[in-house]
Structure formats: C-alpha cells, structure tokens
Amino acid sequence: MRPLILFAHGAGAPSASGWMSGWARRLAVVGGVVTFDYPYMRAGRKTPDRQPALIAAHRAALADARAHRIGPGPVVLAGKSMGSRIGCHVAVEAPEDVSALICFGYPLRGPGGGLRDAVLLALRTPILFVQGTRDPLCRLTELDAVRARMAAPSALHVAEEGDHSLVVSKKGLAARGESQEVVDGRVLDAIRSFLATV
C-alpha cells in the first residue's frame, strides 16, 4: 500500500518553494504527497508561530489529509528542518496516527544553541534522519549520541558535503564527479528502503 506522506516546510520558505516542490515530486514516487503551509506563512509573516500553534496546525493538516485520502495505508510525516521537528511532536502526541517520520535536516540545535533532543527521546515512531555533513544545526556526532539514547527505531542517511538543505557545493560535486541529482537520488533510495521496513 502506498503511504500518505504529509510534507511540512521549514521556517523560512513555504510549501511552494523550489526545494519543497522538488522534493514533493521525488517523494510522489513512493507515496501520495500532501503539502501545507503553517498559519504564519499563509499570513505572510516571517516569524514562525509559537510551537503549540505550529503543532495544532500540523495536526489539523494531518486530519484533513487523512479525511481526503483514498484507501488505506501507512501515514508518514515528512518535513524540512522546523517542519520535521514539529512532525516529531505530532507523532509523540498521537503515535497511533503516524507510522513513520522522515526528517530532512533535523534542527538538533536551536537558534540559541540549545540541544533540542527531548522530543526525539520521547518518540516511539520509526524515524529516518536525512542529514548533510555541512549542516551547522545538526552535527552528526551529536545526532549519533542522541540516537543511541532514543527508544524509537531510527535510521540515518548522510549526504556527504551536503548543507542544511542537502545541497552539495559545486566544488564538492566536481571532486566526486557527481551531480546534485545523483545525491538526491541516493536520498530517495534511502527513503524508499526505510519505508519498506515500516
């Protein structure tokens, strides 16, 4: 059964951004993708809503997506940065509604530098982290330490030389003789393999 994938944007760009649109198209290969915008983004504000409002909006989008889906199947919450973190909170609050989580660039460190691991430690839902090695918001050594303490099954796909958006520099691509499309293809393969296990 094809999963329903609810795909949440990050703090700085809407669901219609180029990055979100590109990944929505790729994810459509493995499931039915639904995107949405948080209220602050719909209102044209730059500053995200407070966390309770974000969680409530995410849960409302999930309820709407479930109400309009055709047929059964697992429900997956995918998200970019902030959207992935809020998806984790939704899964903690309603684990029976979520089969798996896909986090693109999970923001393990907050704007003030604090470690945001509490929600990950509370999770019981299987989760895939997709992280770039140049992501300043999530050092892989710190993520490894958190994963070792998590109760939820977790997997990690690393995009070598990828930034917070998994984008590899032109120099990095040239050094490997690769394109960004090849990097993204490996990410999609990892997602496909992960979803086959949940």
Image: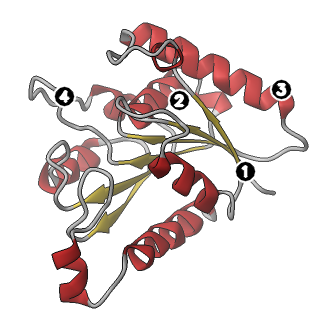
- Label 4: few (<14), some (14–19) or many (≥20) C-alpha neighbours in 10 Å: few
Q: Which residue is mark 1?
A: 3
Q: Is residue 127 visible?
A: no
Relative to residue 64, is residue 117 drawn left or right?
A: left
Image coords of residue 140 (percent x, y): 18, 55
Instruction: Give the residue number, with chain letter if any, for mark 2.
Output: 91
Q: Secondary structure at mark 4?
A: loop
Query: What residue appears at the point 59 percent right and 62 percent down from the top-left corner?
Result: 26
Q: How is the image coloured?
A: secondary structure
- State the separation of the CA atoms marked 3 and 4: 33 Å
The residue at which mark 3 appears reads as: 67
In the rendered image, which quarter is residue 149 located in?
Answer: top left
Quadrant where the N terminus is found in the figure: bottom right
Residue type, mark 4 in image = Gly
What kind of element bears circle 2? helix
Quadrant in which the C terminus appears: bottom right
Where on the picture, by quarter, is residue 35? top right
Q: Where does the image place residue 124, in percent across and percent down from the top left? A: 48, 37
